[in-house]
Image: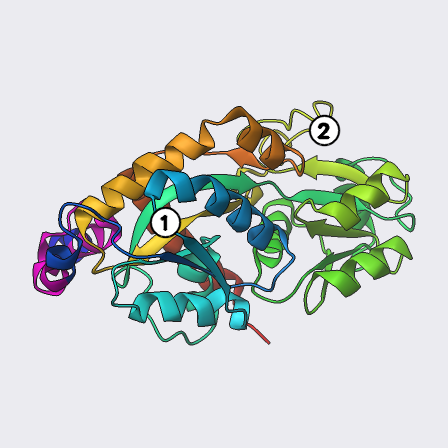
Amino acid sequence: MTTRRTSRRQALGLGLGSLAAAVLPLATRAQGQWPTRPVKIIVPYPAGGVNDVVTRMLAEHLRPLLGQPVVVDNRAGAGGTIGMDAVAKADDGHTLAFAAISPLTLNPHIMKVQYDPLKDFVPVASVMYSPVYVLATTRFKGRSFNDAITMAKAEPGKVSIASSGFGTLGHIMIEQIRRKSGADLTHVPYKGGPQLVTDAAGGQFDLFVANPFAAVNSLIDEGKLRVLAVTGPRRLPNMPQVATLAELGYPEANLTSLFGFYAPAAMPPEAVRRLNADINKVLADEEVQKQLRKLDNVVSPGTPQQFAAVIEREHAANARIVKEANIKAE
């Protein structure tokens, strides 16, 4: 058991000695003046989303620090696993990914992936976490999150709660709420966010879970959606009156979408250290923080080791949750 845990920590950047054979050619190329060529950041999601917008903003700030062009490359598909696979296989020493941690911590438990999430990547830097809203549509007649639980217990199956799909972070949250409360909430899975938000505006279900983004925030401002709870280590500055799920008694459902940078396992250690320092420097910029706060994203800088520990912990936790709840992707 100890040997297995140690190898995982090495793969996650807590000790890269076991990868010396793979690192050596790249380290030789990158010695001294990394980067020596343009840096590519693969975004494993479509253009125009929060992940893409944030990546391009960070790329603009990283260019002058790195002294090289920074190119953003969208490779969407399969819940982010296609783009992450491309990063895992990159051998040029200058390719990164910017993504949520779910392609490493959740997707491998519910679908077949072409990479080892704990061995094929080095976590470089945590950037931000995006909270999740628990929202009520105009169809829901209760006033609070606790009302929803009470109603679902009184009339099993009557209260519906939607997510962006089977096996998503939202689905995991719903299962945790159901298990903790014993309430018979009816899960309504969608295939992505756009149709989910459209149907939410039309009151096609009672509740749903979603990350904050422009369409959702507009509906909240218009009074067509109400935020019953949020997730995160503390209440959101923009919604101090709304309790977190942890405060409401659901700490295991109090999940957020953590985003960060990753590199192939063979990325030279000095490059990882340089990137982490420069990314944290960008995150300390007041204008960058302001832009991230516009959608309630919370800056979460740190070391590669801290980011690696979070990924390893979430990978283990999601394995247990998926198994216990028998969650499978469509």
Q: Quadrant of residue 255?
A: top right
The residue carrying mark 2 is 242
The answer to which of 38 and 49 lies nearer the viewer is: 38
Callout 2: helix, strand or loop? loop
- Residue, x 27% and y 63% (percent of image)? 120
Q: Point out residue 69 in the picture as x, y percentages from the top left corner.
A: 40, 52
Segment tinted magenta in the rendering: 7-25
Q: Is residue 3 visible?
A: yes
| Residue type beneath disc 2 | Val
Callout in the foreground (1, 2): 1
- Label ID, residue 117: none
Q: Point out residue 153 in the picture as x, y percentages from the top left corner.
A: 76, 49
Residue 135 placement, left or right of 283: right
Residue 12 in the magenta stretch? The answer is yes
Residues marked 1 and 2 touching at CB (< 8 Å): no
The residue carrying mark 1 is 311
Neighbour class for label 1 at 10 Å: few (<14), some, many (≥20)?
Answer: many
- Residue, x 38% and y 70% (percent of image)? 85
